[in-house]
Image (spheres, rainbow, N blue to C red):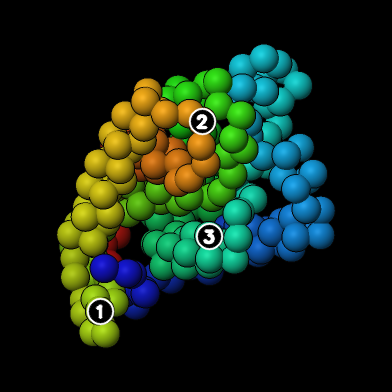
Amino acid sequence: MFPIGDDDSQVRISPIVTTGLIVVNILVFLVELNGGDALVQKWAFVPSRFAEDPASNWPTIFTAMFMHGGWLHLFGNMLYLYIFGDNVEESFGHVKFLIFYLVAGIAATFAQYALNENSSIPNLGASGAIAGVLGAYILLFPQARVDVLVGRMITSMPALIVIGFWFVLQLFSGAGSIVQTNETADTGGVAYMAHVGGFVAGLAIALLFKGRGGPPRTV
């Protein structure tokens, strides 16, 4: 199931933060292409380097959130942010949504860091922060309809099913990555535990915001 859109008919705000985040991610990726591996090594989050000197490497917690490993990585993340971000931004408000996004990204980074703090593989991507957006979306809009591509067909499903299925995949893949970390040498790949950590953080923060601000407007 590949999400391609959702029901935005009742979204009344202009999602300036969501749009701004997409623009910044694209611009940073273009800078990456120009800077090459040296730029990636400098500004991506490297667990072993952070463990040795947190004071000097803390900025990479944030810079890594806006970097990507390739065009497909960038496109997939920005598509998810475009589909789900505006609804969550409307529920939280612009400022709270930006804070929420960054906090979810930080939680995702440290979830992956906890798995293997000795790794020398650069961690980068907006996936963890966007997983937080998905966690908030599934709590706030579980019955919202999401258009998904299944094979060659486009069908509409509840967000609870689409995002829930995505999370289960991340959870099992994350468990597999723990086994791999314990049994094999340090290798690159998808940071599944960052997805799990970001999602759980997004769910928790949305629960907190929902409790303080009353029920959100459904879509």
Q: Let me know if residue 20 appears in the view.
A: no
- Name the amino acid, label 2: Asp
Give the mark toward the camera: 1 or 2.
Answer: 2
Image location of residue 218, percent across then percent down:
26, 62
Q: Is residue 94 left or right of residue 23?
A: left
Q: Secondary structure at mark 1?
A: loop
For the residue carrying disc 3, how many other residues have a C-alpha within 10 Å: few (<14), some (14-19), or many (20+)?
Answer: some
Q: Name the quadrant containing residue 200.
A: top left
Please name the residue that numbered disc 3 is placed on.
73
Q: Secondary structure at mark 2?
A: loop
- Name the amino acid, label 1: Gly
Please tell me the numbered disc located at residue 67. Answer: none
At x 64%, y 50%, the residue is 67
At x 70%, y 16%, the residue is 53
Question: Which residue is most to the top?
Answer: 52
Q: Which image quarter holds the C terminus? A: bottom left
Image location of residue 116, percent across then percent down:
47, 24
At x 39%, y 42%, the residue is 192
Q: Is residue 3 left or right of residue 158?
A: right
Labels 1 and 2: the sequence-earlier one: 1
Whether 207 is drawn above or below 81: the answer is above
Q: Secondary structure at mark 3?
A: helix
Tell me whether circle 2 and circle 3 mark residues in contact (CB < 8 Å): no
- Name the amino acid, label 3: His
Labels 1 and 3: the sequence-earlier one: 3
Please name the residue that numbered disc 1 is placed on.
151
Q: CA distance from mark 1 to mark 3?
A: 21 Å
Please tell me the numbered disc located at residue 186. Answer: 2
Labels 2 and 3: the sequence-earlier one: 3
